[in-house]
Image: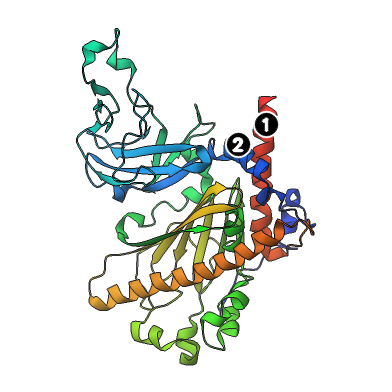
């Protein structure tokens, strides 16, 4: 029989009295004014993940990232010393966007030894310094040392690249992440370089999609049609009602069990899953990644299925017991739209069968994510009617309650500090 850790005495939510247990408001997800407030209070103050170091394989490698919620476009690069840096993507001459290809509205990536503005040819080194001004003699006592690219605070943890737009961050990246997240150090993120990704625009507030992956209460219902008739009961056996929740500062996590229903009854899986030996839970043939760090499966679920870590504000790392991981990003573009990014990572395949199993897992997760997004757009539409303004959350939805509480606290703290 599967063995699950017992929750603390009483409910999960009641062990965090600051969260309350009453109905909650989603006004923070349907108000243009609040979106403007959280842009200033959160996305210009928190550490934001913008990618991984594997995107910068050598000196001169770079990529750009547009972050609407911070009104920013940045260049992330590896400099001549091998360090990862970030700069605002703007020329110091007339304000042209410095790095772009055919469409300035689209992000790009590449390699160069220096950056040259497309408008008037000003050049910048990889350390951001201004090295060349076209017809420099036409300017008035210009000091190139004073007009390098504007830097953005940048740091790396476990291969994940983070930036912070505050003039001076209130915490270092490590302090901001806290022990629940940093206890993941030692997990082989850097070895899992086989990558599949997708991006789509969702017509719903970013927090509503964060909520969708903060609980498994919805899975046997929402995703039942994706699988055969008996999927709902199998999902419950697999532990969708998660046995462990964790909260640390602004971050949260949920851990659940790993009963492999495809080994119990082949009627519960699709023919394509049998052929590829892969599906929603990833490749069936588990990969041994060695001893896991203390932050993985903190509740010691036996058997263990997955851990989902929500790093405030908009980044999720989901680690699977089968030996792979995925990330989600939720980038706000307005109070009721955001760009959702899903990225799936595996060890590089050594056989064709392994590659097919990885692709099957990536495609299956994309389909499930689209089911979630369709539901959330329906949620957004009805929340905006405001005919009902308070909604019930159960004990399994503690992480949803926590996210909206933290968002409100960050906005209140920021605005209180400015008074």
Q: Quadrant of residue 127?
A: top left
Residue 215 appears anywhere in the view: no
Rendered position, 70 above or below 261: above
Residue 288, position in %: x, y? 34, 69
The residues tagged by marks 2 and 1 sit, at their Cα atoms, a distance apart of: 8 Å
Q: Nearer the viewer, residue 180 or 147?
A: 147
Q: Is residue 99 visible?
A: yes
Question: Which quarter of the picture shows residue 399?
Answer: bottom right
113 on left or right of 295: left
How many residues crowd around disc 1 within 10 Å: few (fewer than 14), some, or many (20 or more)? Answer: few
Decide which of 246, 234 is in the foreground and name it: 234
Residue at the spot of label 2 = 41
Q: Is residue 365 above or below residue 128?
A: below
Q: Nearer the viewer, residue 50 or 241?
A: 50
Question: Residue, x 46% and y 86% (percent of image)?
Answer: 269
Locate residue 395 relative to residue 71 in the image: left or right: right
Labels 2 & 1 near each other (Cβ < 8 A)? yes
Q: Residue at x 48, y 33 (%)?
A: 165
SS assignment at label 1: helix
**Snapshot quadrant of residue 233:** bottom right
* Residue designated by label 1: 415
**Residue 123 horizontal/vertical position (percent):** 24, 27
Residue 12 position, x and y percent, is 70, 60
Give the number of the disc on residue 114.
none
User: Dot 2 surroundings within 10 Å: few (below 14), some, or many (20 or more)?
Assistant: many
User: Tag 1 or tag 2, which sits nearer the N-term?
Assistant: 2
Decide: is 205 above or below 75: below
Q: Position of residue 166 (x, y in %)?
A: 51, 31
Q: Nearer the viewer, residue 360 or 4?
A: 360
Q: Where is the C terminus found, in terms of image quarters?
A: top right
Where, quadrant-wise, is the N terminus in this rendering?
Answer: bottom right
């Amino acid at each position: 029989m599967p063995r699950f850790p017992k929750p603390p005495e009483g409910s999960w939510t009641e062990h965090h009295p600051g969260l309350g247990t009453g109905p909650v408001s989603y006004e923070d997800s349907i108000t243009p004014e609040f979106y403007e407030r959280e842009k200033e209070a959160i996305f210009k103050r928190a550490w934001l993940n913008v990618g991984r170091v594997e995107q910068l394989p050598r000196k001169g490698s770079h990529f750009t990232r547009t972050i609407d919620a911070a009104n920013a476009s940045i260049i992330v690069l590896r400099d001549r010393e091998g360090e990862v840096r970030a700069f605002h993507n703007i020329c110091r001459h007339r304000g042209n966007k410095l790095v772009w290809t055919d469409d300035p509205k689209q992000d790009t990536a590449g390699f160069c030894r220096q950056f040259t503005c497309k408008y008037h040819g000003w050049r910048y080194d990889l350390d951001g310094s201004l090295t060349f001004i076209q017809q420099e003699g036409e300017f008035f006592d210009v000091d190139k040392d004073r007009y390098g690219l504007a830097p953005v605070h940048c740091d790396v943890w476990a291969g994940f690249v983070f930036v912070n737009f505050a003039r001076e961050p209130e915490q270092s990246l490590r302090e901001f992440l806290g022990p629940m997240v940093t206890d993941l150090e030692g997990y082989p993120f850097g070895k899992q370089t086989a990558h599949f990704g997708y991006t789509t625009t969702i017509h719903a507030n970013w927090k509503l999609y964060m909520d969708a992956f903060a609980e498994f209460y919805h899975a046997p219902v929402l995703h039942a049609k994706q699988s055969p008739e008996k999927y709902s009961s199998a999902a419950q056996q697999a532990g969708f009602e998660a046995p462990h929740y964790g909260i640390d500062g602004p971050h949260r996590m949920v851990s659940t069990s790993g009963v492999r229903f495809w080994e119990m009854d082949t009627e519960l899986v699709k023919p394509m899953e049998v052929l590829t030996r892969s599906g929603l839970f990833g490749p069936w043939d588990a990969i041994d990644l060695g001893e896991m760090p203390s932050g993985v499966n903190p509740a010691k679920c036996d058997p263990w299925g997955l851990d989902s870590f929500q790093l405030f504000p908009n980044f999720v790392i989901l680690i699977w017991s089968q030996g792979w991981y995925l990330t989600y990003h939720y980038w706000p573009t307005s109070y009721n739209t955001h760009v959702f990014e899903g990225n799936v990572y595996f060890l590089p395949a050594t056989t064709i069968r392994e590659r097919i199993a990885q692709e099957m897992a990536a495609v299956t997760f994309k389909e499930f994510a689209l089911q979630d997004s369709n539901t959330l757009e329906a949620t957004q539409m009805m929340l905006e009617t405001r005919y009902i303004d308070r909604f019930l959350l159960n004990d399994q939805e503690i992480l949803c309650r926590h996210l909206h509480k933290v968002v409100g606290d960050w906005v209140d703290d920021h605005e209180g500090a400015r008074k």
